[in-house]
Image (spheres, rainbow, N blue to C red):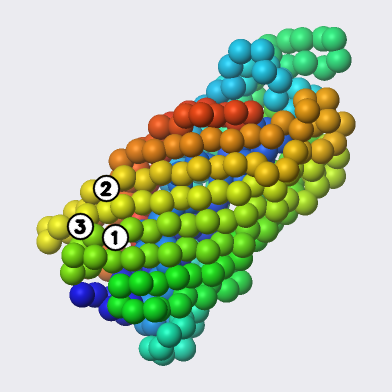
Amino acid sequence: MPSARSLPLVAALVAAFACVPAHATEGGLGKPITGLQGQSYAGVVPPTPGFNLAIGYAYYSGQIGGQRETPIGRSTAIGVDAQFSLLSFTGLYVWPTGEGRWNYASAVAVPFAKVDVGADLRIGRIGLSTDDSDSGLFDMTIVPVIASRHFSQTKHMSLALYISAPTGSYDPDKLANVSLNNWSFSPTVAYTQLGQAGTLEFTTLAAMDFYTENTATDYQNGAVFRVDALLIKRTRSGWGFGAAGGWIEQLEDDTGPTADRLNGFKGQSLAIGPIATYKTGKVEFSARWLYEFDVENRLEGNPVLITGTITF
């Protein structure tokens, strides 16, 4: 049975990356993308100190069809169609606290994004079809502390606070923006349990996302609750296969002039799909594809996440 020392740092590294999305709730997609936050060994920070690097790529293509209005910037849009790609570099440092019941780490994610949006824009009684794109530095994520509790060699839990800062550019008159123009704070708890001599992993993660107001548009996103889970069976060859899923539920209405007119624009979504992993030496790769369903007031599509982590 593997000990906490031998478990990889994929979760702590990639979680900081995966919490970086395409648009705010204001644009029809909350900070998390459905099903991308649950990562392997999310409950574990191993006792071995040192620096680790994760490189992640996410792609999302979604739409809000029909005649449903979506708040974007200072206006609303109908028939939103968006494509989003993100490349993120996440550095994580494990504190030299030694072996024991608790271990700690800190992380920073620096993401770069490209956003393409097409929509039928509504400004007062005027409507027109338009498209827009933007690219550049996205909003950085900072994780001051990840605290991991080891109940046994097979049961682990972690507590963390993810903070996203508006470091990217933002223009309220544009249809596409790489920044959300607000801060978000996400207290997170994760649990990992291992079985079958460590070859079977179940991990689940729950979090709340709290947003500050977008002062450029007077739009306040409501609090969002989310749960992610995955089940992976690993083989001696280094390959692992399983399933991943996620549930996002907005608990509060959005507020502001546009949100009030849209009855709070409260959203929800579910997603499920396959996941594959491969580990060789100090390098681990992971890929997943998810199918979104039961989507309300959010973009609906099929998210893809590919990651690679290196331990130094």
Q: Position of residue 242 (x, y in %)?
A: 27, 47
Contact? badges 1 and 3 (CB < 8 Å): yes
Q: Position of residue 199 (x, y in %)?
A: 20, 63
Disc 1 marks which residue?
A: 201
Residue 169 seen in render: no
**Which of the pair 23/223 is nearer the observer?**
223
Quarter of the image for the C terminus: give it. bottom left
Contact? badges 2 and 1 (CB < 8 Å): yes
Q: Residue at x 57, y 56 (%)?
A: 207
Q: Is residue 154 left or right of residue 257?
A: left
Of labels 3 and 2, earlier in sequence is 3
Q: Quadrant of residue 217?
A: top right
Which residue is situated farthest in the left direction here? 236
Task: Answer above or below: position of 128 versus 206.
Answer: above
Q: Residue at x 77, y 51 (%)?
A: 212
Q: Residue at x 76, y 22 (%)?
A: 76
Q: Which element is circle 1 on?
A: strand
* Distance CA(mark 1)–CA(mark 3): 8 Å
Q: Which element is circle 2 on?
A: strand
Disc 3 marks which residue?
A: 234
Q: Is residue 249 left or right of residue 228?
A: right
The residue under label 1 is which amino acid type?
Glu
The residue under label 3 is which amino acid type?
Arg
Q: Position of residue 304 (x, y in %)?
A: 40, 39
Of labels 1 and 3, earlier in sequence is 1
* Distance CA(mark 3)–CA(mark 2): 9 Å
Disc 2 marks which residue?
A: 242
Q: Which element is circle 3 on?
A: strand
Of labels 2 and 1, earlier in sequence is 1
